[in-house]
Image (cartoon, rainbow, N blue to C red):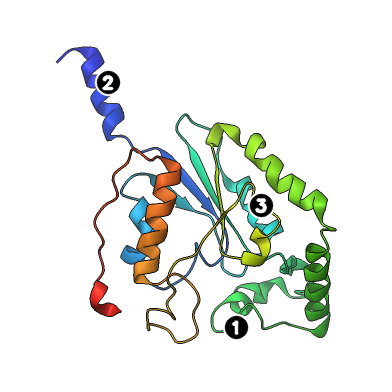
């Protein structure tokens, strides 16, 4: 085998890096790790999960600051959350308690004070009235700012998608609740995670062949 053939062989085996930013759709304990959509992607990429549960969109964008300098082949996925969420740091007096406050079962709709509830209502109204256009324009601009990474943008929030549908893909897959695994949990279920994996893989590289489903479809 000549030198060029050896180099091509190395490149075929090498996985490109994939950085995934977002909220609990990236960082959730269900389904178990090997059935999570991000774990399926590890078959094709060296995956770095930067998402953190309960994060607002400002915090999700800030996760990009943890990505190292660009290397050829690097990709980015951003999972945007609901537009009503406001930056948590404005409402947490004791940062030492932040991790415990954000952890399950203290859910997204559990607030430390009434001011946060009022502010999220305001943010929702401003979004619906299309008065957060600078924010939307920035999200759109990210596509070109991150063009080397050829980023993929998703959201689970239909509310967010209404004003970003021209550049953000809406996620609709079966949830843990739909699949009878967790009664009130809207995160992707075992089958939903696999479906989401297939959708993201197609958008990342439609020449890649999905791995086989690891779960048991009889769960439905």
Quarter holding the C terminus is bottom left
Residue at the spot x=14%, y=15% of the render?
Answer: 1
Considering the numbered disc 3 on the image, is that residue within a helix, a strand or a loop? helix
> Is the residue 26 above or below the residue 29 in the image?
above
Left or right: 96, with 207 as reference point: right
Toward which corner of the image does residue 9 lie, by quadrant? top left
Dot 3 alpha-carbon crowd within 10 angstroms: few under 14, some 14 to 19, many 20 or more: some
Asked if residue 32 shows in the view, the reply is no
Q: Is residue 82 above or below residue 110?
A: above
How far is the residue under mark 1 from the one under mark 2? Answer: 51 Å
Residue sitting at x 46%, y 50%: 48
Q: Position of residue 207 (x, y in %)?
A: 34, 37
What is the distance, in whole Å, between disc 1 and disc 3 at their CAs?
23 Å
Q: Secondary structure at mark 1?
A: loop
Q: Nearer the viewer, residue 92 or 186?
A: 186
Q: Badge 3 is on which residue?
A: 61
Q: Residue 83, how many percent across, how many down? A: 71, 64
The residues bearing labels 2 and 3 have C-alpha atoms spaced at a distance of 36 Å
> Which residue is farthest bottom?
183
* SS at mark 2 in the image: helix
Task: First in sequence, mark 1 or 2: give its number.
Answer: 2
**Residue identifier under label 2:** 7
Q: Which residue is mark 1?
A: 106
Residue 140 is drawn in which quadrant? top right
For mark 1, does the 10 Å Cα neighbourhood hold few (<14), some (14 to 19), or many (20 or more) residues?
A: few
Q: Which sits earlier in the primary sequence, circle 1 or circle 3? A: 3
Front residue of 104/82: it is 82
């Amino acid at each position: 085998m000549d030198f060029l053939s050896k180099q091509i062989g190395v490149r075929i085996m090498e996985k490109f890096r994939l950085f995934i930013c977002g909220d609990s759709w990236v960082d959730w304990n269900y389904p178990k790790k090997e059935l999570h959509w991000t774990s399926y992607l590890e078959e094709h990429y060296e995956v770095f999960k930067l998402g953190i549960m309960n994060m607002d969109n400002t915090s999700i964008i800030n996760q990009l600051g943890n990505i190292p300098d660009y290397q050829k082949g690097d990709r980015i996925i951003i999972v945007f959350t609901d537009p009503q969420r406001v930056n948590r740091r404005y409402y947490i007096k004791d940062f030492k308690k932040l991790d415990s406050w954000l952890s399950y079962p203290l859910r997204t709709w559990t607030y430390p004070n009434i001011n946060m509830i009022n502010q999220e209502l305001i943010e929702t109204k401003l979004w619906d009235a299309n008065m957060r256009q600078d924010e939307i324009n920035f999200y759109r601009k990210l596509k070109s700012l991150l063009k080397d990474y050829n980023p993929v943008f998703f959201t689970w929030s239909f509310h967010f998608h209404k004003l970003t549908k021209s550049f953000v893909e809406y996620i609709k897959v079966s949830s843990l609740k739909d699949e009878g695994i967790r009664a009130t949990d809207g995160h992707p279920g075992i089958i939903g995670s696999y479906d989401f994996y297939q959708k993201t893989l197609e958008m990342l590289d439609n020449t890649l062949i999905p791995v086989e489903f690891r779960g048991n479809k009889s769960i439905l």
